[in-house]
Amino acid sequence: ASFPKQLWSLVSERSMLQETVLRGQAAGVAPPVIVCNEEHRFLIAEQLREVLVEDASIMLEPVGRNSAPAITAAALLVTQTHPDAVLWMMAADADIKKSEALTQAMTKAVQAAEAGRVVTFGMAPTRAETGYGYIDKGAPLPGVDGIFAIKSFREKPAQAVAEEFLKDGNYFWNSGMFVFRADVLLDVMRRYAPQVVESVTAAFERRKTDLDFIRLDKAAFAQAPDISIDYAI
């Protein structure tokens, strides 16, 4: 709890957080917004300095409420200056080795996001894995080649179900990575998870700046449902 995996050097000489931030820089994105636990703020700030990332926005969650409130808070921050900015939401514990393939996928994702879609990434399964969630791929969407609707998200399956998913060929591992316009994300959240937006907006409006950190209001943020973005929208 005091030193989570994102802060360890597990897949390279850099920490997983550092790899994530540098992955964004390599893709030419704007300075990152990092939403993290209050306890880890100085560790994270120091790791960013080590890789010469000095213009990040570090937003502190007073209590953990899963990904939907955290992403909503980041979107609210970005809409202050760039409401139609495209955000690339990455958890800081991914190991991505094929950077060229990622760039190609991101190009398509950004095009779809600019057109108003909330985009996620499916990974072709290599085994009947029961430890991952799955995406059931739907029909192709017009406008961008290689972009599809999502029929459903499927939770971590039993072994027999995972084997059926693998045979089917239409199921993909859920990467948990998303691309969307900030304003679109907030509109969708207002439609499907209004209590999340209400609580997080109140926490954001009562925020305080402490050194280089943005502190969300604890009482308001604690009222947000504990829910992932997958379930929320």
Image (cartoon, rainbow, N blue to C red):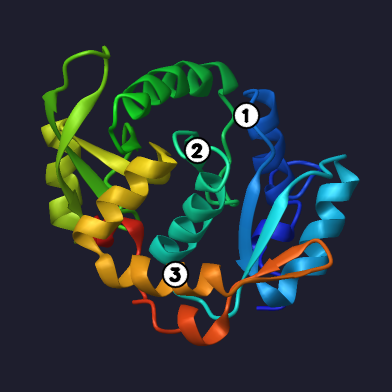
Q: What amino acid type is highlighted by mark number 2?
A: Trp
Residue at the location (33% across, 41% down)? 184
State the mark number for residue 29. Answer: 1
Q: Nearer the viewer, residue 116 or 206?
A: 206
Instruction: Please identify the residue farthest to the bottom as the structure is shown.
Output: 219
Q: Nearer the viewer, residue 96 or 21?
A: 21
Q: Position of residue 54 (x, y in %)?
A: 84, 45
Residue beneath label 3, please? 200
- Contact between marks 2 and 1 (CB within 8 A): the answer is yes
Residue beneath label 2, please? 88
Determine the secondary structure under disc 2: strand
* Chain-order first, disc 2 or disc 1: 1
Residue at the location (20% across, 57% down)? 191
Crowdedness of circle 1 by 10 Å Cα count: few (<14), some, many (20+)?
Answer: some
Determine the secondary structure under disc 3: helix
Q: CA distance from mark 2 to mark 3?
A: 20 Å
Quarter location, residue 6: bottom right
Residue at the location (48% across, 50% down)? 75
Q: CA distance from mark 3 to mark 1?
A: 25 Å
Q: Position of residue 148 (x, y in %)?
A: 20, 26
Q: Is residue 127 above or below residue 217?
A: above
Q: What amino acid type is highlighted by mark number 3?
A: Val
Q: What amino acid type is highlighted by mark number 1?
A: Val
